[in-house]
Image (spheres, grey):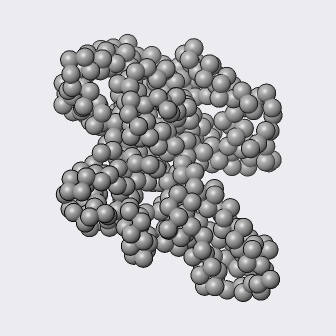
């Protein structure tokens, strides 16, 4: 049995283990959806913000956070959702973006700086790519194809 | 909004109903889209619409529960346990899905409207409502882009696709006026300014798609007052069947 430490940074580190069920290489920290962690005695409240309104992964993420913290010995865990300010892909960490690319998904660009198109093919690195559909396997991704290696790939859209 | 306290709940429900009914209609394409990528695109748009509807219903439920001093209203009771006459969605969103051209045209006309409306609501005094609008605006931006491309592709496509789109424009146009006819829960001035911009954007797209914007068309209305086409009842019967048959069933 693990002894829980009631410290926000410690809980934040633990959450590194909880991943996005749709994109398992990304932790909830990488995604940037953890907005706040409140500790009140032995009560822990984790505040998250949804990525997309209808994202079916959100309910599961909330459940996973709760059950993982339970397994770490935190008995009273509440996960709440805030909408404002709205989540943006700019909150995704640089580590997260690197993990995405290694996983085969072109990471989102910075919203303010670049255009909303993948910088390069995550497989061969070519910059010669074309859009196939604005919606890929999930709402947050677009489907692209590399004109060089011909491989189709997902691009995590700016949001 | 003229009367904040009386118009807030009907207005939020109106927004939520539009989203839910269009989402339910679009979801009929799931597994039936013309190609896999577009099947996924329309169902992802549908998922966004349902997500937005959920947030709006939850917000409406909060208001209702505060007014009534209980916890009886939830997003589910509002979606599953209201009758046809209690839904205030515009008629346009309940029309049958038709062919693919009709579906993408409706999506485009509605998404442009939603885009302008959410942009306006982003600065709404009701903070949770403006938060939902800001969040949804990002999603709707993609819906506009996707559906606009389809309208161009089919309108300015083959002679057959062009003809089908031209017919679809004729069929749906009489349902567009209702979007801008202010109900008591809406702000007429805001709607009017949205209408001007909407018309401009639509005209631009349809002309680029070699389609004609109909003029002087008789406009249908009634949805905002709960007077619907015959199509809504059938849809609700299917959508609400489980909760009506097995009250409080969960999974």
Q: Nearer the viewer, residue B152 or B224?
A: B152
- Residue B50's spot in the image, x, y percent? 55, 41
- Residue A58's spot in the image, x, y percent? 59, 57
In percent of the image, x 20 and y 62: which residue is there?
A127
Q: Is residue B105 above or below residue B127?
A: above
Q: Nearer the viewer, residue B194 or A10?
A: A10
Q: Is residue A125 above or below residue B200?
A: below
Relative horizontal placement of residue B209, taking residue B187 as reference (left or right) = left
Relative horizontal placement of residue B198, taking residue B156 as reference (left or right) = right
In percent of the image, x 35 and y 50: which residue is there?
A143
- Residue A128's spot in the image, x, y percent? 19, 57
Relative horizontal placement of residue B247, taking residue A137 as reference (left or right) = right
Q: Would you say residue B24 is visible in this rendering?
A: yes
In percent of the image, x 29 and y 21: which residue is there?
B165
Quarter of the C terminus of chain B within the rendering: top right
- Residue B229 lies in quadrant: top right
Q: Would you say residue B5 is visible in this rendering?
A: no
In percent of the image, x 50 and y 33: which residue is there?
B30
- Residue B11's spot in the image, x, y percent? 56, 38
- Residue B213 lies in quadrant: top left
């Amino acid at each position: 049995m693990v002894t829980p430490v009631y410290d926000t940074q410690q809980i934040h580190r633990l959450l590194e283990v909880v991943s996005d069920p749709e994109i398992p290489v990304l932790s909830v920290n990488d995604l940037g959806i953890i907005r706040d962690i409140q500790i009140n005695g032995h009560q822990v409240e984790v505040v998250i913000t949804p990525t997309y309104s209808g994202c079916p992964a959100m309910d599961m993420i909330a459940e996973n956070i709760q059950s993982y913290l339970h397994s770490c010995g935190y008995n009273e865990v509440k996960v709440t959702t805030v909408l404002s300010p709205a989540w943006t892909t700019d909150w995704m960490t640089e580590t997260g973006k690197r993990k995405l690319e290694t996983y085969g998904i072109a990471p989102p660009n910075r919203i303010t700086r670049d255009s909303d198109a993948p910088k390069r093919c995550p497989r061969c690195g070519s910059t010669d790519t074309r859009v196939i559909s604005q919606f890929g396997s999930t709402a947050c991704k677009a489907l692209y194809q590399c004109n060089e290696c011909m491989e189709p790939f997902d691009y995590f859209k700016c949001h | 909004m003229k009367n904040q306290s009386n118009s807030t709940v009907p207005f939020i429900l109106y927004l939520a109903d539009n989203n839910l009914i269009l989402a339910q209609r679009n979801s009929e394409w799931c597994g039936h889209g013309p190609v896999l990528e577009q099947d996924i695109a329309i169902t992802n748009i549908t998922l966004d619409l349902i997500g937005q509807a959920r947030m709006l219903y939850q917000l409406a439920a909060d208001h209702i529960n505060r007014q009534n001093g209980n916890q009886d209203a939830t997003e589910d009771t509002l979606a599953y346990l209201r009758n046809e006459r209690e839904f205030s969605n515009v008629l346009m969103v309940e029309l049958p899905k038709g062919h693919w051209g009709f579906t993408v045209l409706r999506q485009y006309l509605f998404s442009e409207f939603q885009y302008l409306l959410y942009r306006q609501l982003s600065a709404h005094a009701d903070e949770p409502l403006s938060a939902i609008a800001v969040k949804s605006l990002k999603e709707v931006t993609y819906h506009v882009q996707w559906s606009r491309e389809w309208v161009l592709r089919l309108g300015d496509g083959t002679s057959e696709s062009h003809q089908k789109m031209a017919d679809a424009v004729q069929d749906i146009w009489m349902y567009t006026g209702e979007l801008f006819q202010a109900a008591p829960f809406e702000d007429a001035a805001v709607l009017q300014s949205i209408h001007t911009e909407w018309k401009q954007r639509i005209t631009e797209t349809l002309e680029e798609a070699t389609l004609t914007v109909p003029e002087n068309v008789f406009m249908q209305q009634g949805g905002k007052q709960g007077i619907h086409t015959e199509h809504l009842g059938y849809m609700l019967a299917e959508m609400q069947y489980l909760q009506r048959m097995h009250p409080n069933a969960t999974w």
